[in-house]
Image (tube, grey):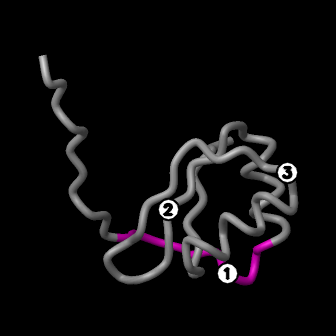
Amino acid sequence: MSRVVLLALSEADVLAHCAKAEVGVSTIERLLGGGVRLVCSSSRGAATIRQKLHRHLIEGVVTRERHRPAKPLW
């Protein structure tokens, strides 16, 4: 099962729900159309969030912001 969950909630709300459910967050990013893309630390955590926040799941294709990691300074 995928660790990625797409949710129609704010970043702060998602992080609060993850903390309450004791689900580890690997990364979280805002989506251009609204909502967030959450990557949980485990597939079990992702399943927990999907179950608890099933009303806020985003189905289908979403547009992500282009992200480039920072280059090392050396």
Left or right relative to 2: residue 18: right
Indicate which disc, 2 or 3, sits on the residue closer to the N terminus.
3
**Which one is nearer the viewer's eye here, 62 or 60?**
62
Q: Position of residue 56 (x, y in %)?
A: 67, 81
Q: Say what amino acid the circle numbered 2 marks.
A: Arg
Q: Which residue is mark 1?
A: 56
State the extent of the magenta-drawn residues as a range: 53-62
Mark pair 2, 3: CA separation: 18 Å
Mark pair 2, 1: CA separation: 12 Å
Q: Which mark is residue 36?
A: none
Q: Is 15 contained in the magenta span? A: no
Tell me whether the residue at label 1 lies in contact with that at label 3, contact meaning CB atoms closer than 8 angstroms.
no
Q: Which residue is mark 2?
A: 37
Q: Which residue is mark 3?
A: 22
Q: Looking at the magenta stretch, what is its main secondary structure?
A: loop
Q: Residue furthest left?
A: 74
